[in-house]
Image (cartoon, helix red, strand yellow):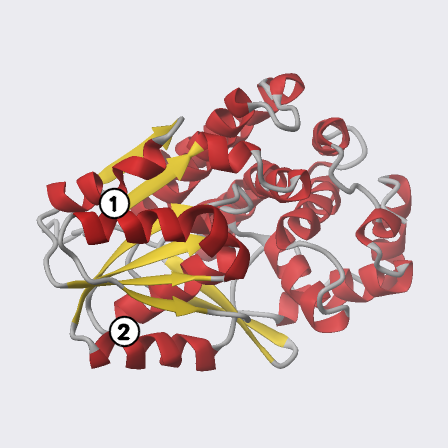
Amino acid sequence: MFTKSSWIRLPRNVLVGHGVLDQTVEAVSELHLRGTPVLVTSPTPRKIAADRIIEQFEAAGFSPEVVVVETASFAEVQRVIDAAEAVDAGFLVGVGGGKAIDIAKMAADRIDRGFISVPTAASHDGIVSGRGSVPEGDTRHSVAADPPLAVVADTELLANAPWELTTAGCADIISNYTAVKDWQLAHRLKNVEYSEYAGALSQMTAELLVERIDAIKPGLEESSWVVVKALVSSGVAMSIAGSSRPASGAEHLFSHQLDRLAPGAALHGHQVGVGSILIEYLHSGEHGQWQNIRDALDKLGAPTTAEELDIAPETVIEALTTAHEIRDRYTILGDGVSEDAAIEVATVTGVI
């Protein structure tokens, strides 16, 4: 008897392109959302985007509440929840980078309200995924939450964001290569449920981005179009899978361990990019695709070495040998990589 079922939550509206920030209220109206909007943002995104959205809502007869967050923390999530409950919020709007969007997403999930994602930087696939990431002490927690009801990604804004944020977003997508390989391995060896559709979509997203890597340039709005569509596609793959597996494998465990050992040294996307070089070598050996991953990152100007991450070589080795301890997720790291093996991998690939 067949009893399998699945509930896939996807964004209902995805607006991507030049000037779409001015259509934010229109996107909300099409969702038939009511009540007081609560905008969650941070100082710089407020100046370049959130104030414009506030004016739109006020012109449409709304009285938006604004919460400006300075840091990513569970305390800030609670502060947003308190503010939203105080005004009986109808829905939340995250305007900014990963910090504001993750906090708004997690707060909206906790109080069962709709969430709108308005990214001002294409720095990671959290702009559309059903997960939020918040640090606590020397640990970064990945928390399940509903994906946004709508995504409003203005390519003009994204093209003007710091280039390193865009390269971090690209590296996050490129890391899907190894994430899917780890997922397939876990399926074969541990009978972890695998979605052919989600896996194929995630891998195709990485491949398409790498194929167009030469066309992704600083300040070019067409580049932002390519990158944000890839980030949306990656987030959709996670929604289809019902987990972060299509976009998070050993390379993310490696990055999370770096966060513990060298907090704040490098951007998340850059860390997983370097992690993908190492993990691809573990999967496929010296003649695998690790060189293609490294070359794609290099063309973007994204880090490919420990030095470019501003992280000591010995810290990279420690992260690689201990990353399997981060969470109960089977990957190529298995029950751990020896120090000698880690040194060989990092040396052959040029990471150290």
Amino acid type assigned to the residue bearing label 1 in the image: Leu
Dot 1: few (<14), some (14–19), or many (≥20) neighbours within 10 Å?
A: many
Query: For the point 63% across and 54% down, which residue is it?
Result: 268
Mark 2 — residue?
110
Residue 1 shown left or right of residue 223 in the figure: left
* Residue 304 location (% of width, % of height): 79, 41
Mark 1 — residue?
10
Q: Nearer the viewer's eye, disc 2 or disc 1?
A: 2
Total marks shown come to 2
Element carrying mark 1: loop
- Asked if residue 180 can be seen in this view, the reply is yes
Dot 2: few (<14), some (14–19), or many (≥20) neighbours within 10 Å?
A: some
Tag 2–tag 1 contact (CB < 8 Å):
no
Residue 219 shown left or right of residue 116 in the figure: right
Element carrying mark 2: helix
Query: For the point 81% across and 59% down, which residue is it?
Result: 316
Residue 155 shown left or right of residue 331 in the figure: left
Amino acid type assigned to the residue bearing label 2 in the image: Arg
Residue 228 lies, with reference to residue 39, above or below; the image says above
* Residue 221 location (% of width, % of height): 52, 24
Quadrant of the image occupied by residue 197 = top left
Closer-to-camera residue (125/51): 51
Disc number for residue 137: none
* Residue 83 location (% of width, % of height): 29, 77
Q: How far separated are the C-alphas under marks 2 and 1?
A: 18 Å
Query: For the point 49% across and 62% down, which residue is it?
Result: 42
Quadrant of the image occupied by residue 139 = bottom right
